[in-house]
Amino acid sequence: METDRTKSMRGASILVLCLLQIFAIGQHRSILIHDGNGVCEPSIAIDPSDTDRMVAGMVLDRVAHSKDGGENWSVERLTSPYGVWGDPVIDVDHEGRFYYFHLSNPPKGEWIDRIVCQWSEDGGENWTKGSFAGLNGSKDQDKHWSVIDPENGHIHITWTEFDAYGSKDTTCKSRIRYARSEDRGFTWTPAQTISTVSGNCLDDDETTEGAVPALGPSGELYVAWAGPEGLVFSSSSDGGESWTDEVSVDPMPGGWNMDIPGIYRANGLPITRCDRSDGPHRGRIYVNWADQRNGEDDTDIWLSYSDDRGKTWTHPARVDSDTGNAHQFFTWMDIDQTNGNLYFTFYDRRHFADSDSTSIYMAMSTDGGERIYDFPLESRELAFVPNSNIFFGDYTNVAAHDDVVRPIWTRLDDKNLSVWTSIVDIDRPRVGLYRWVIEAEVKPKKEYCLMLTGPSTEEVLRKGRSPKAQLELHHLLDLDAYPKGVYTLELKQGKKTLWKRTMEKHGETE
C-alpha cells in the first residue's frame, strides 16, 4: 500500500488528501479457525465494545473465540440440555454479551423441535445452558436468524416452521415464525406466524425460508424471505407485536434452490439489513440474495434496497462484477453501523469456467449500494475444488464494526472441510482501486465537481453543493475500468481548481 498525505494552502482553500493505491491482490491474510469433523455453516460476531473480541460458531456443535481480532482462535464443543444440532447463529449485544442460537436434539423431545439460545458473558469462553423458543409440539423449527436492539437489549428471532420437514404430503406446510426475548434470553414470547402465504415442506423453491431479521433506527423490525411468491418482505412498527402482509421485493427467477456443480446443495436465500448509522443512508433497508435469472450456468449476487420502509424496492443491482457465465453463490451481507458501509462475502468461479475450482470473494460499498466493488480475498492459486458428496453447509457469513471486517467461510478440499476468516484491510481491496478522502474549504451552496480527465476521457465523477464551507468527499476510483494512460483528477468549483492530481496507468491490471 502506498499512502500519500499532502496538505496545501491556496488562499482560503485547505485540502487534506489520503491516497491509497493497490499494486497486487492477495493482501488479506487468511486465518484457519478449525478443520475436520464436518465443520461448515460458520457464523461470526464482533463485540462492538471491544473489536478484538470475536466469537464464531460452526456445524455441528463447535464454538470458537478470539481475543486478538481473529489472529488466534480457541475452539471447543458447545453442549446443551436441549442438544446442539447445527445451524449456528452468533450474535452480540451492545454490552458484549455473545449469543449462540442453534437447532435442538433433546433427549426428551423431538429432533429440531425448538430454537435454542445460549449466551456467554466472558467473550465465548463459557456458556450458559440456555433457553429456547418456538416449541410447538412435534413440528420442526429450522433456519433461524436473530437481531438485537442496542437500545433495550430485546432479542428478535425469525425462522421457518415445518409441519414435517421434508414431507411430500401436500397438506404439510411451512411458515415464517417470530419470537422475542425482553430479558436478554431468559424467557421468550410465544411464537407467532408472520407469513400469510405458506409454503410446502420439501425444503425447496416452494418452501418459505430465509428469514433474517433487521432492525431500523427507531426499533422497526424488517425481514425478507423466499418462497412460492418469490422474494417477499414484511415489517413491524410495534416491536414485533404485529406484522404487515408480504410485499414483493423481486420475483427471484429460477427460485431459491439451485444446482452448483461440486456443491452438495446450494441456495440463494436472502439476507436483510438496515442502516442504523448516522450516515446519509440512515434507515435504508437492503436485501441481498443470489439467483440464476441469467441461466443455470450463471449464478449471480444481487442487491435491492428500499428508502420507504419496505413499501417499494429498487431494481436489483449486481454485486459481483463478473461479465461472463460463471457461478457466484452463497452470499452474505453486513452493515458497519458506525458508518453505513456495506460488506458482502460469496464464492466465485469467474476464473475457472472449465472446472469446479472455487475462490472466496468480498464486495463493499461506501455509498449506499450505488457503486459496489468486489475483490478476491485469496489468490487464484488458493482456490479449492469441492466434493459434491460432502455436505458443504448452507451459508457463509461476515461481520463488520468500526472498520473491522471479518468474513467467515468454509473450504472443502476433496473430503476435508475447514472454516476460515480473513484479516481484511478495507483500504486495500484490489488492484487498480484508489480510495480518496478529500477535505477542502469551498464556497457554501456553490456547485463543485470532481472531474477525471484522461485518454479520450473527460468524466465528472461527483457533483454537488456543500451546505457548509468545509467539504469532505469520500471517493473510490477504479482504474480497472479505463485503458492505460495518464489521468488527471481535479476538484473544481466554478473555474477554480482546488486540487489537482495526476496518475499513470501502465497497463491492464488483474
Image (spheres, rainbow, N blue to C red):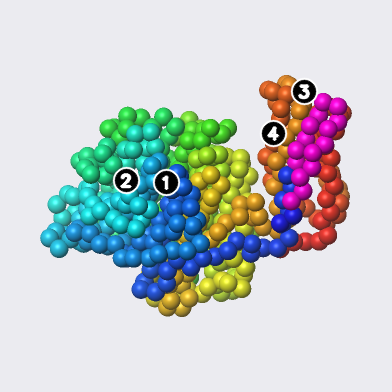
Give the class, few, some or many, for how many residues have Cα within 10 Å of label 1's Cα (few <14, many ≥20).
many
Give the residue pinned by disc 1. 231
Disc 4 residue type (three-letter)? Glu
Please tell me which of labels 2 and 1 falls first in the chain. Answer: 2
Q: Secondary structure at mark 3?
A: loop
Q: Is residue 428 above or below residue 442?
A: below
In front of the other: 230 or 426 = 426
Disc 2 residue type (three-letter)? Thr
Q: Is residue 79 above or below residue 99?
A: below
Rendered image quadrant of residue 104: bottom left
Give the residue pinned by disc 3. 443
Give yes or no for residue 13 being in the magenta stretch.
yes
The majority secondary structure of the magenta stretch comes to: strand
- Calculate the distance from the C-alpha at mark 4 to the C-alpha at mark 1: 38 Å
Looking at the rendering, the stretch of residues picked out in magenta corresponds to: 3-17
Q: Is residue 314 above or below residue 496?
A: below
Give the residue pinned by disc 4. 472
Please say whether residue 484 is visible from this viewpoint: yes
- Residue 455 horizontal/vertical position (percent): 86, 50
The residue lying at 71 percent from left, 56 percent from top is 1
- Calculate the distance from the C-alpha at mark 4 to the C-alpha at mark 2: 40 Å
Disc 1 residue type (three-letter)? Leu
